Image (cartoon, rainbow, N blue to C red):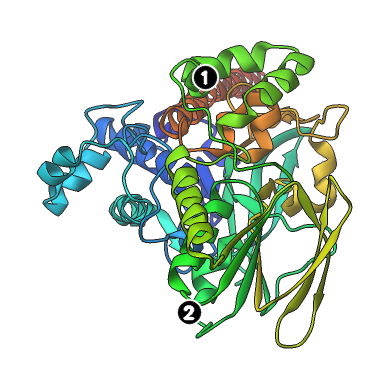
Amino acid sequence: MFDSLTEGTCMSEVPRGEREVLDLLGIGFGPANLALAIAVSEHNSAVDERERVRAAFLERQEAFGWHRGMLIDDATMQVSFLKDLVTMRNPASDFSFLSYLHEQGRLVDFVNHKTLFPLRVEFHDYFRWAAARVDDLVSYGVEVVAVRPVVEEGELVRFDVSTRDGTVRSARNLVVATGLVPSLPDGLTTSEHVWHSSGLLHNVDGVEEASRFVVIGAGQSAAEVTAMLHERFAEAEVCAVFSRYGYSPSDDSPFANRVFDPAAVDEFHAAPQEVRDRLLAYHANTNYSVVDLELIEDLYRRHYRETVLGRQRLRVLNTSRVAEVVETGDGARVTVESLTTGERTVLDADVVVCATGYRPGDVTALFGDAAAVFRRDDEGRPLVARDYRMLTDLEGDAAVYVQGGATEHSHGITSSLLSNNAVRSQEILDSVLRRAATSGTRAAETCATRVDQVVGVAAAAGAG
C-alpha cells in the first residue's frame, strides 16, 4: 500500500533483506476479522496496485469456525440476515448472504420462508463460504504467542508478531479479534462431566444414555441446551437452574434495537463513562440473559404437557443457585439452593452444562511487559479511540485496533455482536488508510528535507 509515497524517497533507509512490513495484520479470524478481510479485498480490487493494502490474518484453528459447539440443527440467528458481513456498508457486495443463497440455489426458497432469521448452521455455512473466497489472506493453524512493539528514534514504527512455529511477521497495524472466553461459575472447570455450553456438540455425541442433566443459566444458550437435551435424551430428566422466576424474553422491539445502529456507536463513544455504563444497564435485556419468546413458549408447553401427563422430565428450579458441584467419578453431584427459602436440593447428574456466557479476553496479554504502554481507565479497561485504536503512551504511526467485547465499555453493546460488523470493518480500514496517507506525507516531507540538506552539503563542498 502507498508504495507510490515511498518509491524513490529515502530508499537507502530500508535495509536490504529486511522482512516485509505489512500494512495490516489481523490476529484471529472469526466473523469480525473476516468482515475486515472482505473490506480489504474489495478495496484492493477497486484501486491501483500501488494503493492496495498489504494485509494478512492469522487464525489458530485449522479451518474457519464460529461457535461450532452450539450449531444446534433448529437454532436460529438472533440478528437479521441483512446484518451480514457486508450489506450494512455495501449493499451491492457479492459477499452478501443473499449472494450466498443465490450461489447455493436457495434464494427463492429462502424468500418463500418469510423470515429475517436464518438457521444458525446456515449462517455458519455462509461465513465459511465467504472465508473461502478470501483464503489467500489467511493462514490457519497459526497461533500467535507474542507481540513486540518496535520503537525507533522514540516512535512506535511497527509490531513484530511471533507465532508458535517460530515465524515472525511484522506489520504497522494490528487488528486483534481473538473472541470471547467461556465463563464458568467460580470453582468450576470443564471436564468429562462438566461442560461449558460452547462445547455442547463436541461432547454430547459421547453420551449414549443418561438419566439426568443439569443446565445452569437463564439466557438463550441455556434455553437452547435445555430444549436440545430434553428432546435428544427421551428418557432423561433435564433440570434447568437459574435465579429468576422464569426465562426473560429478549427486547428486540424497533426502538430498543436502535442501540445496535451504527450511529449509536458515535453517540455512545462521545458520552461520559457514567452515561455509557447506564446505557449498558438499560439495554442489557437486548442481549444478556434473555431468550427468544418463541423458545420460552416452547419450553413452557413441554413443561405443562409433562405436568398434565404426570411425568416431569423437564424440571425448572427457578429462583435458585448452584451452591456446590462435586464430581463423583461417573457424574457430578449438584447442590441447588433456593434463594427464597434456603432449601437445598441434591441432584446426581450425568452431566452439568454451564450456559453461563462469555467474558472478554485480555487483548493486551500477547504484549507481555510491553502491555504497560496501553492507556487504561480507572477500572483498568483499555482506552479505545472511536476508530477502535487502543491508545498508548507512545508516539508514532503504528497502531493496535481491537474488535470484540474489549470495546463494549467504550463503543457499546454491539461490540461483540454481529450487528455492526460490516460497518466497523470499514471504519477500521478507513482509519488505516487515512493514517497511512498522513504518515506517508510526513515521510515524504522529511525525505525531501534530507535530500535538500545533502544537496546543500555537496554544493558547499563543490564550491570549496
**Secondary structure state at the residue bearing disc 1:** helix
Location of mark 1 (residue): 256
Quarter of the picture holding the N terminus: top left
How many badges with numbers are in the image? 2
**Pick the front one: 303 or 459:** 303
Q: Residue at x 79, y 66 (%)?
A: 188
Tell which of 197 and 268 is nearer to you.
197
Query: Residue 302 location, x and y as percent?
Result: 47, 56
Residue at mark 2: 205
Q: Secondary structure at mark 2?
A: loop
What kind of residue is marked 1? Ala
Q: Residue at x 59, y 64 (%)?
A: 143
Identify the mark at residue 206; answer none if there is no mark: none
Give 139 or 378, whichever is nearer the viewer.
378
Q: Is residue 453 left or right of residue 127?
A: right
Indicate the position of residue 75 as horizontal and vertical percent values. Answer: 40, 53
